[in-house]
Amino acid sequence: MKKKLIIGVIGCGRIGRLHIENISNHIHFVTIKAIADLYANEIKAWAYELGINNVYSDYKKILNDTEIDAVLICSPTDTHSKIIVEAAKAGKNIFCEKPIDFDIENITFALDAVRQSGVKLQIGFNRRYDHNFKAVKDKIAEGKIGDLHIIKITSRDPAPPPIEYIKVSGGIFLDMTIHDFDMVRYLTGGEVTEVYTNAAVLVDPAIGAAGDVDTAIISLKFANGAIGVIDNSRKAVYGYDQQVEVFGLKGSIAISNDTPNSSVLSTEEGVFCEKPKHFFLERYKDSFVAELKDFFEAVCEDRETSVTGIDGLKPVQIGLAAQKSYITNMPVKILT
């Protein structure tokens, strides 16, 4: 029987609420003792319905609670590294949403604090826990396709986020593509050594006015000699497009989109199937539960987390290199 964990959640926006509801409904060896959000008064009724009686506007009340074993950091990105440091000093195990920070120095400082305190840290790259991506990873690890030569990732959202969000998101490479940068590391087991970005504003001029791009092709080189490409768009009219192909010496493995059902209607008018699931909450629903369960089990079993602080650092380094490449129109080397 697993040890009963007591946790707190900092930040109750869309992802924070999702985690809280998933824990309450699916992970029964964890108790949420307290949650914190700047708009605490607006979420009290919802929290009480879930049996969470401690709702704070000041997250430090969670960090100061000696009964709490671990915290989830789901607050805005510009608070992540600061709260990691404070939580580590308070002796709390930490699950933090991506990215840790937009600044490498801040990330390094946070990871140093975690190491010095001895607490556990997991970063929220939930796609590693998706059934499709995990199947690809397992087949690669088993040597089914031999030495890897090429990896292709397609990642396209059904619609762009609000412009106000884009202004504070860190840009497409640190907000959206960061998941793909993590995925290429996860699937290949290797490090990216060079990035070249070709990007444009093709979806909405307001995105360009906000200082970002909405369409991108990122070419990658890996330490083992393999090459890769990621294509991104903020708007795929047919739904959430998430596909991967990995090609190797002995063969290839690919995954296509998840759909609401797998039926295919064939008539004289044509062949028809479902569009992809609409967005990440539907597509990656189960992975959000799996990543938290794995983190909590790592705490209970006193083992290393599956997605470490270094796994949080590397995609930011790649993302910053992708930004620089776009600005300079030159390939950018990454030290591994």
Image: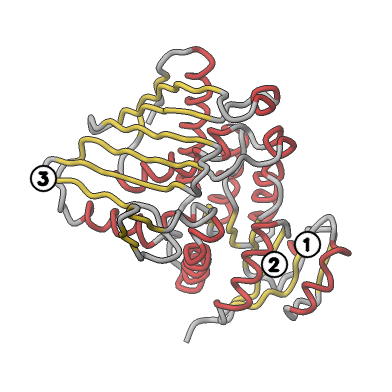
Kind of element beneath mark 3: loop
- The residue positioned farthest toward the front in the image shown: 268
Question: Callout 3: few (<14), some (14-19), or many (20+) C-alpha neighbours within 10 Å?
Answer: few
Q: Counting residues from the N terminus, which is met first, the one under dot 1 or under dot 3?
A: 1
Q: Which residue is mark 3?
A: 250
Q: Give the side of residue 209 with respect to residue 305, left or right.
A: right
Kind of element beneath mark 2: strand
Q: Which residue is mark 1?
A: 36
Where residue 118 appears, as percent x and y from the top left, is 54, 57
For the residues labelled 1 and 3, the Cα–Cα distance comes to 51 Å
> What residue do we see at 58% from left, 58% from top?
95
**Mark 3 residue type:** Lys
Q: Counting residues from the N terminus, which is met first, the one under dot 2 or under dot 3?
A: 2
Residue nearer the viewer, 69 or 333: 333
Q: Which residue is mark 2?
A: 8
Question: Callout 2: few (<14), some (14-19), or many (20+) C-alpha neighbours within 10 Å?
Answer: many
Residue nearer the viewer, 311 or 151: 151
- Pair 1/3: label in front: 3
Q: Give the side of residue 12 with respect to residue 186, left or right.
A: right
- The residue positioned farthest toward the right in the image shown: 41
**Mark 2 residue type:** Gly
Q: Quadrant where the C terminus lies?
A: top left
**Mark 1 residue type:** Ala
Where residue 5 appears, as percent x and y from the top left, is 60, 76
CB-based contact (under 8 Å), mark 1 and mark 3: no
CB-based contact (under 8 Å), mark 2 and mark 1: yes
Q: How is the image coloured?
A: secondary structure
